[in-house]
Image (cartoon, rainbow, N blue to C red):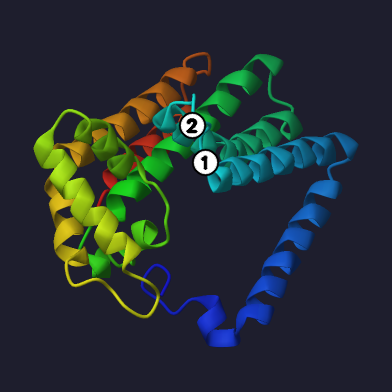
Amino acid sequence: MRRGVPSAQTVWGNSVAILTGDLLFARASKLIASLGERALAIQASTFERLCLGQLHETIGPRPDEDPIEHYLQVLADKTGSLIALAGLVGVIFSEAPEEYREPVESFGERIGVAFQLIDDVIDLSSAVEQTGKTAGTDLRAGVPTLPLLYLRARAETDAEAAKLLGRLEVAIHDSGEDAVHPDFADAVAELRRHPVTDDTLAEANRWADRAVEALAPLPEGPVKKALTRFAQAIVERSG
């Protein structure tokens, strides 16, 4: 299931789902190619950054690297870069003033991070009919979401956090696509109620606020108002 509906590969199979994704990427490339060489170069740079972000997520942080900072950078590279690209291309090819490019690009990257952090909170929600996700989907897939990273940091000095972390890690390890550990749902629900989830919401709001702050150089009007409202809508969808 994906967002409450059967996922593409369950309906049409893996091969068709993958080829359809390739087709969509090809058509997007055709569209951006029509804008010229500069647009292609920007797209290629963004795609490179996205791939590096995915690679860094797969490999994980280095021993001397802060896991939380590493995770936020991955979000910026994977999602922030795409929204930043959309904003930058819009500014350039609408022939807007040069000074609008950096603010809109910064807005896109920051709101991309906020979007993913809210997704981390939604992943813990039991309201499947609203979120379209089964609680703990990302955790079961091995994604170290921010609430879990915050919990790991707290567990170093907090016995209760360490106890919950232990339960979660066992439940995650013993859960797969076909079977779920009997304690998994309860452990996820406890994580949802834990202060680390509120901390994640606060962090998402900080990124959204910083995104809106980046728009300060833009003139007042419907575009700035729409982007500001978009940032607000991102953090209101916590499920």
Secondary structure beneath label 2: helix
Task: Say left or right for 92 vs 237.
Answer: right
Residue drawn at the location 88% of the way across and 40% of the way down: 36
Amino acid on which disc 2 is placed: His
Specify whether residue 84 is in view: yes
| Callout 1–callout 2 Cβ contact below 8 Å | yes
Rendered image quadrant of residue 184: bottom left
Image check: 145 left or right of 181? right
Which element carries disc 1, helix, strand or loop? Answer: loop
How many numbered marks, from 0 up? 2
Amino acid type assigned to the residue bearing label 1 in the image: Gly
Q: Check disc 2: other Cα within 10 Å, few if <14, some if 14-19, many if 20+.
A: some
Residue 18, image x and y in percent?
67, 72
User: Which residue does the image show at 65% across and 22% down from the upper left?
Assistant: 101
Give whichever of discs 1 and 2 has the lower sequence position: 1
Label 2: which residue?
70
Q: Quadrant of the N terminus?
A: bottom left
- Gap between marks 1 and 2 measured at Cα: 8 Å
Occupied quadrant, residue 90: top right
The residue drawn where x is 34% and y is 40% is 146
Please indicate, yes or no, whether residue 136 appears anywhere in the rendered image. no
Residue with the mark numbered 1: 60
- Residue at position x 41%, y 76% in the image: 5
At which x and y percent is residue 122?
29, 53
Percent of width and height locating residue 143 = 42, 52
Work out which quarter of the rendered image holds the C terminus and state it: bottom left
